[in-house]
Image (cartoon, helix red, strand yellow):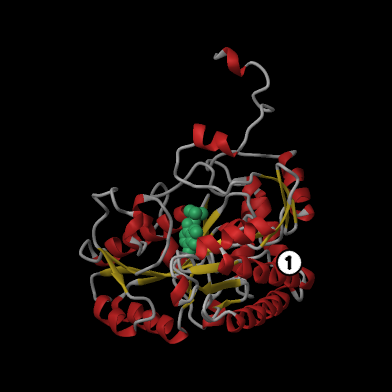
Amino acid sequence: MNAKLDSGVTTRSVTRQTFDEVLVPTYAPAAMVPVRASGLDVWDQEGKHYLDFTSGIAVTSLGHANPELADALTKQLNTLWHLGNGYTNEPVLRLASALTEATFAERAFFCNSGAEANEAALKLARKYAHTKFGPHKSRIVSCLSSFHGRTLFTVSVGGQPKYTEGFEPLPQELNHIPYNDIEAARAAITDDVAAVIVEPIQGEGGVIPGNPDYLQALRDLCDQTGALLVFDEVQSGMGRVGSLFAYTQMGVTPDILTSAKALGNGYPIGAMLTTSEIAKYLAVGTHGTTYGGNPLASTVGLKVVEMMSRPGFMERVKEAGAKIMANLEKLSSDYPQVFGKPRGMGLLIGLPMAAEYQGRSKDYTKIAENLGLMLLIAGPDVVRLAPALVVSDEQIAEADRLMREAVEAFIAA
Ligand SMILES: Cc1ncc(COP(=O)(O)O)c(C=O)c1O
């Protein structure tokens, strides 16, 4: 063993600079290093406070270090961590029961991330089509600007070429069509299509809500051609838009739904939900993962579902979303040269940069962060807000104040 690791390895001093020295440079994290958080409050290494309107990219929806979740996880940590899929466990049985009771689905498959949930959905759709109709039915249709994860299959299905460049050769039989364009969907969804995958609200692609008529047209085209309709609700799901999943507000039910992110509030978990009829095509041995449905992740997921099912929870998400939206509309009308019209659903909100400031969303969020407000971007032209669903009116007012201060500094810079 390397003698340097004998002592102090867990307590050695580390800074943002250490990232550049020992991490693969796939990310460019902020200059500050967060060390502690509670609710929507975050503190960095220097003790500086930030109001978090990112939720770790729509993940910590019940707030950082949520005491009820910490309590449930701690109890499970002292009971049973992991067994592998040769055994089932009580938390996963309860979580699958809760998710199937709360949705159209009758069967659940668990994994560790959104990409893996989509990978499972796409593999299931291919298996279903091959077995039921034959190998000619293999094409997958997805939308331009969509994001479905970073495995080679999901990143290729995603509609952002910048993420696949240099990773070729890519999986075959994939088509990308413009989002919310019914005519393009009609032309693309033919008898050789195995699956259509779509985000009911595009998140990474700029916070663009799907048009219910469009989603219904996808449903009809899938029914006519025998393709499976997959809703990627990794970002839009788990209460983010004011219902457990967005599909219920859209009035369109998919064949397969994927979830991750807020399902674990920061504990890694992904889920693919579907009907019994479709699920049977992933028979024993056709797919799997070591950690999927592990007792720790399942315990957290179950507690999250339970907490989000409490009376008034979703109403408050909608109310908080409406308050933020009203503030942003005012902000954009006060600074029309900087911001366009805000859009979104519930607490997934995008604020586009106006023509004069195209490509500058990150510059704005960096200024806001210096002032103590953490914000996201959704591409170079959109500022994205995704605060924890438990955000208070005081925090909404504080974020508004900081966004206004930030815009003044942004214009002056
Ligand atoms: C809609 C959507 N699908 C899939 C993913 C990928 O999830 P993960 O990063 O957990 O693999 C994301 C992540 O941002 C997402 O927004």
- Which residue is pictured at 69% across the width and 74% down the height? 317
Say what amino acid the circle numbered 1 marks: Val
Q: Tell me the SS state at disc 1.
A: loop
Residue 5 x/y as whole percent:
60, 18
**Residue most extreme to the front:** 412
Look at the picture and state if 22 lies above or below 327: above
- Dot 1, how many residues are within 10 Å of its Cα: few (below 14), some (14-19), or many (20+)? some
Q: Quadrant of residue 228?
A: bottom left
- Which residue is pictured at 69% across the width and 79% down the height? 323
Q: Quadrant of the N terminus?
A: top right
Q: Is residue 353 visible?
A: yes
As rendered, which of 367 and 262 lies closer to the eye?
367
**Residue most extreme to the bottom:** 213
**Mark 1 Cβ inside 8 Å of ligand 1:** no
Residue 153 x/y as whole percent:
34, 54
Is 258 positioned to the left or the right of 101 in the image? left
Q: Quadrant of residue 103?
A: bottom right
Badge count: 1
* Residue located beneath label 1 in the image: 390
Residue 327 x/y as whole percent:
67, 79
- Which residue is pictured at 69% across the width and 72% down the height? 400
Q: Quadrant of residue 221?
A: bottom left
As rendered, which of 366 and 375 lies closer to the eye?
366
Residue 392 x/y as whole percent:
77, 69
Q: Is residue 239 visible?
A: no
Look at the picture and state if 13 lies above or below 301: above
As rendered, which of 191 and 343 lies closer to the eye?
343
